[in-house]
Image (cartoon, grey):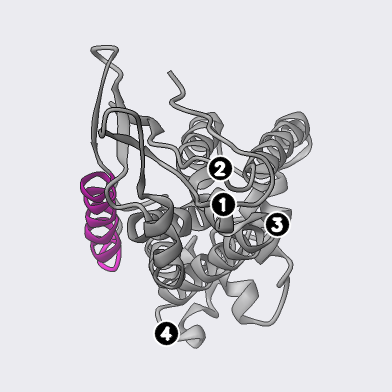
Amino acid sequence: MIFPIGDDQVKGGAFPYVSYTFIAINVIVFLIQFMYQAEGSLICEFGCVPNEVVAGEDYLSLLTSMFMHGGWMHLIGNMLFLWVFADNIEATVGNFNFFGFYMMGGLFASLAHIYFSVGGDPAALLDCCSACSDISCEGKTAHCPGSIPSVGASGAISAVLGAYLVMFPKSQVKLLVLYLMQSFKIPALWFLGFWIAQQLFSGFMSLGPETAATGGTAWWAHIGGFVFGLAAGYFARDIGKEAWQPEPVAGGKDSSTPHVPPSKSEGKGYDDGDMV
């Protein structure tokens, strides 16, 4: 398995308070889920069920579902991506702008998931049996996509990845090959391009009969969030390009580390470097 563990860091700009706060909130909420799992799943209570949202119910779940996860690996994977990719964006656009961008990205991702779960025909889901219902499913289609609660920060993080691709395509992403315990770097354009291609393939496959490869993952939330991130990143790309200009150093050579110009900076300088 291969995981991103670091990237090139912009110099200066806003300290990523919002990114780190989101990580902390997600971890705390998951611990609460873990504590209460014996008394019933909080996922059914706070997860986003497409059928219910389409019926005009439980709109709050569009927000609460963004901070819940289905398991430890789900949580760790999402938080790792958030740690690696979010800080450059927040350092460049500022804390307040990043907060709004992240939340809007998560909402857009959930709406994309709901649309493709419903399939454009809400009436077709009336006979669906809810995955969280205690009522017998006899005579109904059991657990169709619109009845299954979705949780996770994946949609909002996908928006972060989309914006990162537009703003920092030349950034080098450090990847860890878990089996070999060795790392190497590749351009963000390659890594994120491969990632979204994989999501698109799985997303279109999920429109057909469910398989082990396509079931259980909200692929269209990932795709929807990424598209939102691309659009948002387009408006901030000039700031990202300016932040990426290398600083000249003694001897006439350029540093490979990007920086946010003083006019674009916010707060104290920040550089978290690679994770390992």
N-term mark: 4 or 1 = 4
In whole angstroms, how far apart are the C-alphas of marks 2 and 4?
A: 46 Å
N-term mark: 2 or 4 = 2
| In the depicted structure, whether residue 42 falls above or below residue 141 | above
N-term mark: 1 or 2 = 2
From the top left corner, tell me how far across and down residue 232 is, in percent. Answer: 46, 70
Q: Nearer the viewer, mark 3 or mark 4?
A: 3
In whole angstroms, how far apart are the C-alphas of marks 4 and 1?
A: 48 Å
Badge 4 is on which residue?
120
Q: What's under tag 2, amino acid-wise?
A: Gly
Instruction: Please identify the quarter of the rendering in which residue 201 is found.
Output: bottom left
- The one nearer the camera, 238 or 73, is 238
- The one nearer the camera, 36 or 110, is 110
Badge 3 is on which residue?
64
Residue in the picture at 27% in, 28% down: 251
Residue in the picture at 51% in, 42% down: 82
Residue 149 seen: no
Residue in the picture at 67% in, 47% down: 18
Q: Nearer the viewer, mark 2 or mark 4?
A: 2
Q: What's under tag 1, amino acid-wise?
A: Pro
